[in-house]
Amino acid sequence: MSLIAATHLKKVYGVGETAVTALNGVSLQVEPGEFVAIMGPSGCGKSTLLHLLGGLDRPTSGSVMIDGHNLSDLSDAKLTEIRRRRIGFIFQFFNLIPVLNALENAALPITLDGVKPAEAKARAAEWLDKVGLEGRSDHRPDQLSGGQQQRVAVARALVADPALVLADEPTGNLDTHSSEEIAGLLRQVANDWGRAVVIVTHDPRIAAYADRIIFLKDGAVVDETVLEPRGSSNGRNAELAGR
Amino acid sequence: MSVRNAILGLLADHPRHGYELRAAFEALAGGAALWSVKPAQVYTTLARLEEGGLVAQDSVEQDGGPEKHIYSLTPAGQAELADWFASGVPAEHQRDEFFVKLMLSLSTEVASPYRVLQAQRSKLYQELHDLTTRRNRADPRRELAQIFLLDKSIMHLEADLRWLDLIEARLDDIRRQPLPRPTPRPRGRPKIGIRNSRNEEPGYKANTSP
Ligand SMILES: Nc1ncnc2c1ncn2[C@@H]1O[C@H](COP(=O)(O)OP(=O)(O)OP(=O)(O)O)[C@@H](O)[C@H]1O
Ligand SMILES: [Mg+2]
């Protein structure tokens, strides 16, 4: 079963003359362990799509299934719970809390969810290790580089053990080298740690880390390309071309 | 040109056999998969260099086997090599097969230019993915030079992909413009004194007449 199954998503902002159709019939599926990049010109609806997939906003029509839950059927309270437990978010500007150290920042989502502080910290410490930040637990965000702050944000996104990680321009504020490190880490999150990862990016070098790139234009999917491991016989692309 | 100059450079280090030159060149240039040369090309180049007095050939008797030819650099060859090192190499302005394909798709009904763009983008992303994987697997403690060569290709692919986005964004505008056509060449023998060689060269100019 696909981890994400979005069908005929439409999103219209506003009403009447000033209405803007941000998404116009987008369908897509993402499997566990898959790393997908969404690309397209500014204003084509990438962030809108990510918000709908993450349950941060509701579609005008169409449906989003995440991990077996149809988000449209859920009450706001239930939606918030799914979002907190099953979905991790990563943002362009890291969004860490300045007065908390790396460990406290990474532990925050489960601390808020009622996990005991000692256990929350132990789990956060494990993720900080995995993202390559051992020894930085007690550094505050202003004592970390941009790339390190984004690693804290990746640990924070994973601490609740989500099935899905969503990131809007996660490397938009980083230099080329740190960007590629974060892209490599996100690839690991998907391919090695089995999460579904969906990112929005404008950067071809970051998109090249993905397993699949989806191209949006004017609120619709206009193209899709599967990046095969080296030397494979392009099975998925052949399949896509045949559809 | 590059193979010729590389041979001069390799011989400056020490005299070598033809087959040794070929293997050394391929290793330096990034591997045979990237830039392979045929033995014949090496030997023709050596013959020309010898004719021009830039390299000299010694025959060495081998006990039992056929005699071997060893090439070395002459003083003229050394001067030529120094000139090469002292001057810059022009940037590669590649003839672009994709561009020709795109222009043809605009002028025929055979293929949609959007599809042509998408196919190209897919292909370039696949290459970028492969190169990135290779670069990330290379060991910076032993293969730094190779990593930088891969980086060069990665940066060029990135530029090509951004260029495709620019074209895609303006494709409808491009379609509205007339396709480039050769300017008609005057028939018969050109009249000396009237023909302006710059302006009448068959060129790559947009023809505004339908
Ligand atoms: N809250 C909103 N209210 C009204 N219009 C909106 C809102 N959010 C987005 N839009 C409009 O919807 C369209 C898609 O916006 P979206 O933010 O999804 O684009 P994007 O692809 O993420 O662009 P960018 O690459 O610049 O971030 C745009 O025309 C935008 O102006
Ligand atoms: Mg956006």
Image (tube, grey):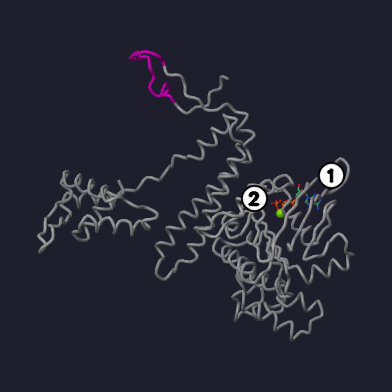
Determine the CA span between mark 2 and mark 1: 33 Å
The total of numbered circles placed on residues is 2
Q: Position of residue A237 (x, y in %)?
A: 60, 52
Q: Earlier in the sequence, mark 2 or mark 1?
A: 1
Give the residue at the far bottom of this rendering: A118
Taking depth in this image into account, of A206 and B105 the one nearest to the observer is: B105
- A239 in relation to A137, above or below: above
Q: Residue at x 20, y 52 (%)?
A: B78
Residue bounds of the magenta highlight = B186-202
Label 2, residues with CA under 10 Å away: few <14, some 14-19, many ≥20: few
Residue B130 belongs to magenta span: no
- B113 in relation to A212, above or below: above
Left or right: residue B206 versus residue B82 is right
Residue at mark 1: chain: A
Left or right: residue B91 versus residue B44 is right
Give the residue at the far right of this rendering: A75
The residue at label 2 has a CB less than 8 Å from ligand 1: no
Name the mark nearer the viewer: 2 or 1. 2
Q: Position of residue A163 (x, y in %)?
A: 73, 69
Residue identified by numbered label 1: A19
Residue identified by numbered label 2: A240
